[in-house]
Structures are given as structure tokens and as C-alpha cells.
Image (spheres, rainbow, N blue to C red):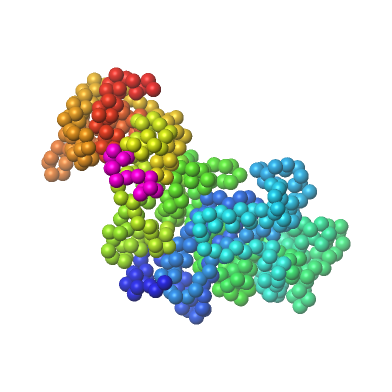
Amino acid sequence: MPVSPALRAAALESKAWPFEEARKILKRVEKSGQKSVLFETGYGPSGLPHIGTFGEVARTTMVRRSFELMSDLPTRLICFSDDMDGMRKIPENVPDRKALEPYLQMPLTKVPNPFGGNYESFGHHNNAMLRRFLDTYKFDYEFASATDYYTSGRFDDTLIKALEKYDDIMAVMLPTLGEERQATYSPFLPISPTSGRVLYVPMKDVNAKQGTITFAGEDGADVTLDVRGGRTKLQWKPDFGMRWAALDVDFEMFGKDHQTNAPIYDRICEILGKPAPEHYVYELFLDESGQKISKSKGNGLTIDEWLTYADTESLALYMYNRPREAKKLYFDVIPRAVDEYAQFLAAYPKQAEAKDKLMNPVWHIHGGHPPQPESGNVTFALLLNLTTVANTEDKAVMWAFLKRYMPELSPETHPRLDKLVGFAIRYFQDFVKPAKKYKLADDSEAKALADLAEALGKLPEGSSPEEIQKIVYDVGRREPYTTTQKDGTVGVAQGWFNMLYQVLLGEERGPRFGSFVALYGIANTRALIEKALKGQLAQE
């Protein structure tokens, strides 16, 4: 689609991180004079796609869309599967693990599929899961298989170049290895002609003119093997650089655990005659205890778990925000991400200037075409508190409150809100309800609550959240909740609201209280206060 000059000019100046990365690519292509741009992400198919896979493809797509706003050059995104790697250990989550033991060190596309079905191998099964995963989230990508690229000859010319530069590659790799590993290391891994296994063996001879390597086979006899046609593959660090060189990759991002190896990848790519791509290193996610998330440990959140309690857009926002900061990824971060996404989406139509739109995360989440926000101001935090006091798992009950609050709301006119209602019910049942702990009001708190109930009783049902919030402030303007503002006026300290949340909702924090009362109803709120004063909430 045509790009307006104002929007392109704003993109060239924007401080949003995807634009900063895209400008590096733009500078690169202007220098090279190339006619297209290739983005790449990598995937290790020894396991199923996970939340990190989503993050890497989503973030790379954000950079790609930012580049497309700056340049008319065509772009492609390749999602590359390293499915020719040998199976070094048997995954914990497969059925009949013993049946896979004979296939250790076999390429993943030669290991039988333990999950059954019509897939040719374990690698093919996991590749299909990756494609289904990416298609579910409507990513625009091309799938690439290492097995296909090696066996079809796509890498042959670069592999011959690697043979020609064998000593140079070894000079890069050997200083990074221990003494024992140095004695046996080779960047080439032959695929055994007899067993089919990926062999980690030293080379006896390297013949670039013939395109062959010679090594001791599994029976001890020398084997000479052509490196082309899928008969060999490269060790993973040289493979990174070789792939960049063979495909002319312009951009790839990866986690901080690759950072120390990035100069190795770059140097090997350059040895093979191509400039290293631009790359972006992101921080890894942490669990609730601050430990690095690990697939083998199973700590942190899976993408299915996130999407049980919130939508894809909130997850994309979490991926967009501060990718170079270590962030905890566990259930407590979900409600805030949901509400932040809604805030950014609501702000987007009001942002008249292009530079402000491009700084809004929803531009990047939706590739420059965010949807129209729904009307109403019902936050996820508010829905969670409503679920608390409504004590229901029935969406219809929740909608009865919502429609009384704003009659124009309905599941048909507000489909995102309807989804959030379902998410809130599940989140409350699984996380909020088990941790709920009501505080018993002391004498002064009980007096304040009784005064609040009386003051609310003077308001008609249907009063606005602002009218209700004023009453809440007026009643709370008492010791020990008063605070003096900079202009000398007496305000209300956060402790007043904390007390309301702890006594009435059994939580430390909550939504704007006037909005909660407007949604739940004045009469219902007064009844809730009465139950709290009788100690009935604390007994539940």
C-alpha cells in the first residue's frame, strides 16, 4: 500500500526500538544496493514451539513492518528449522521414551515420530506443529527446513567455500574450545553412511577441490565423504554463519544466551564471503523467583497458559515492551498487560501526529493497522473484582452487571469485552480466589465504612463513577487517611483505598473504586459493606 510522506518521515526519526533496528537495515541496503531484504528466525525442533518462539517471530515481524514503512524494497521472513540436528537426548514429554533410544544422534528428520499420525519423523511432526503455531497467529513467513536445504543442494556452494576456508574457520573455533575438545573438533559433521547418525569426529583430510572430507568411520576404517547433498552438516556455531552467508540474511535476532557467540557467527559469515547480518539481542524471561525460564524445568508460562487467561494482543504487547530488559513471565503479569493494551488501543485514534502513532505499541502489534477500540471503559482489573463479589462462573451473570452499568454494551457489539469476561472468570477461579484473604475492619475502619455506606445511600442508582468517586474521597478525608497536597489542600492517602480493597475485596490492590461501585451497583456495594461489618466476608 502507498505510504504517506509524513508517515515515512516520522518512521525515519522514530525512537521506537523496531524503527531503530529497521534504520540499521536501511543503512545496510543503501550501502549494498541490494534489491530485497531477508529476515530470519531460527527454531530448534527437538521440542514443541513455545512462548519464546512466539516472541522471536513477533518481534522480528515488528522490525520487518517498520522497515517496510521506510523502504519500498520487498521483504521476506524465513522461519528456519534446524531439523537435521542429531537427537542428543530423548525429550521428557514423549510416549515410550525407550523406543527412541536406538535413534540417539540420528537427525531429527530420521527419528520415528513418537506421537503417531502421518508424519514422516519426529522432526517433521515438530515442524508441522511450528507451522500450525505460526499460522494460528497469522504470521507472514516462509518455512525452511535444514534437512531440505542440505539435501537439495541449496547449501552446497557455501559448504565447498567452507572447505576452502577450513583452516580459517578452525582458527576462529579452536580458541573457544577446551584442550580436549580442540583435539577432536571439526566444523563438519558427517552423516554416517552405515548408521545414519550424526558423527562428532576429527577430520583426517579435507579436500576442497574434490569437495570431500576423510575421517575414521564407526568401525575404525577411513571413510571419504562428499560434503554436498546432505551427506554432512555443520556444527551449530559454524552453521549459524554458513546459513547467513548462503541465504544472504540481513537481520536475525536472538536471546542473550547467544550474545557471546555472535562474533563467531559474524566472523564465519564474513570468512565465507558475505557481510554478517544486522542482529538484535534480547533479554531472556525470568520466572516468579527471578530464575531463567527453561523448557526442561517447566518454570514460567507457556503460550497456551497465557492464552487461557488473556488474548494474543496482550501477549504481543508484553513482547514489544522493553525487549532488552529481563522481565518476569508468570501469571501475575497478565492482568496489567491486558489493560495496558486496551489503554494503548484507546489512545491510538486520538493521536493526530504520525510520530505519536508510531510510538504507540499497537501500531507495531498490528503492523500499522490496529482495530478500532471498543467503547466503554471496563478494565480487566475491574472485571476481576466484579467476579470476586459476584462469585460466579457464569458469563451471563457478569453481563447482567455490565449491561446495567452501560446498557449499550452486549457480547455482540463488544466481542473483545465478552472474551475478557471469560478470561476474568478463569483467572479469578485459578489465581485470585485461592489467594483471597479478607481483613477484619477495626473500630475506626468500621466507622469509616459505615459512613461510606450511608453516604452512598444518598446517591441514586445509575450515578456516574465520577459522582461516586467524589463521595468515596469525601468520606475518606479523615485520619489516618488524610494527606496534604502541594497546594495545601487536604487529600486522601492511598491507605484509604487499600483498606477498602482489603476489607471488601480480600485483595491488596484494586480498580478505581468509583468505577467498581458503578458497575457492581450502589445497593450491592452497601450490602457488601454490611457483610464486611458483620465479619461475614472474612468467614467465606
Q: Is residue 528 visible?
A: yes
- Which of the 4 image quadrants contains residue 167? bottom right
Q: Is residue 403 magenta?
A: yes
In the image, 30 versus 437, the foreground residue is 437
Image label count: 0
Q: Position of residue 47 (x, y in %)?
A: 63, 50
Residue at image position (38%, 57%) is 371
Q: Position of residue 76 (x, y in %)?
A: 53, 69
Residue at image position (68%, 56%) is 124
Region in magenta:
402-415
Would residue 359 be found to the left or right of residue 523 on screen? right
Residue at image position (48%, 40%) is 289
In the image, 240 versus 518, the foreground residue is 518
Seen in the picture, residue 466 relative to 475 is either above or below; the reply is below
Report the residue that reaches farthest toward the left: 488
Report the residue that reaches farthest toward the bottom: 33
Seen in the picture, residue 527 relative to 323 is either above or below; the reply is above
Q: Is residue 162 visible?
A: no
Report the residue that reaches farthest toward the top: 534
Q: Position of residue 63 (x, y in %)?
A: 45, 64
On-image quarter of the N terminus: bottom left
Q: Main secondary structure of the magenta part?
A: loop
On-image quarter of the C terminus: top left
Residue at image position (58%, 72%) is 248
Q: Position of residue 392 (x, y in %)?
A: 40, 31
Seen in the picture, residue 374 relative to 185 is either above or below; the reply is above
Q: Is residue 486 magenta?
A: no
